[in-house]
Image (tube, rainbow, N blue to C red):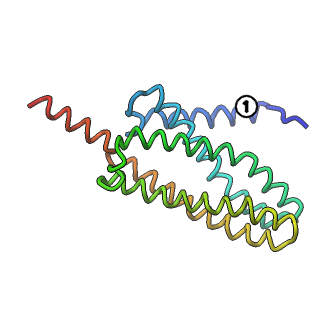
Amino acid sequence: GRVRLGPERFWLLAGALLVAWSFGLSGHAATAGPRWVTMPALSVHALCAAFWIGAFAPLLLGLRRLPRAGALVLVQAFSRLAVPAVACLVLAGVLISALQLRAPSALIATDYGRLLLLKLGLVAGVLGLAAINRWVLTPALERDERGAAWLRRTVAADLALAAGVVVLTASLGAVPPPRALAEQAAHGHAHH
């Protein structure tokens, strides 16, 4: 059937969109231009990350408590929503990173770039586990009970890696990106 958008779901969705929009208004990335690009990109990035990372704990709980058939339905439903969410998350992240870094060399030459590389390494781990979950372990769950045990392990690992991603993302907000450093240098030279 069709999902109805009752008042509770409407307010929950409105609140989530408002929180995601707020990410486009604050921090180093929000000051990157053009704002008509960065604000929506940050909002999409935050909303998709919140959905994807926020779903790991309930998914793990469901894998522990539901019988195999129920766990399979849960995993398949999550997968259908996660694929487009992760695609939007990655595209928005690439756009934000390109605006912040300005040059690939900044990945290695700056503190911001090195933190971003660490974050990307953890994200790659989460994406690798997601691929294993989707193409190897979900079909195993369809066949027998052992798939659920392996899925529980990989989703728990996803949760741990995602926690590291969140910590590194917060750390990025405290370090000026190469774009901001270049703007400060240009502003400083203009006054001399």
Name the residue beneath numbered marker 1: 10
Residue 147 placed where, x, y %? 79, 70
> 99 or 115, which lies in front?
99
Residue 8 placed where, x, y %? 75, 35
Question: Badge 1 local density, few (<14 within 10 Å), some, or many (20+)?
Answer: few
Residue 189 placed where, x, y %? 14, 33
Is residue 171 shown left or right of residue 150?
A: left
Q: Residue furthest top?
A: 36
Q: Quadrant of residue 158?
A: bottom right
Q: On screen, 147 above or below 95?
A: below
Q: Residue at x 42, y 53 (%)?
A: 116
> Which image quadrant: the C terminus?
top left
Q: Residue at x 30, y 39 (%)?
A: 180
> 180 or 138, which lies in front?
138
> Dot 1 lies on which element?
helix
Q: Quadrant of residue 163?
A: bottom right
> Which image quadrant: the N terminus?
top right
Is residue 159 shown left or right of residue 70?
A: left
Q: Residue at x 72, y 57 (%)?
A: 58
Q: The residue under label 1 is which amino acid type?
A: Phe
Residue 35 placed where, x, y %? 43, 27
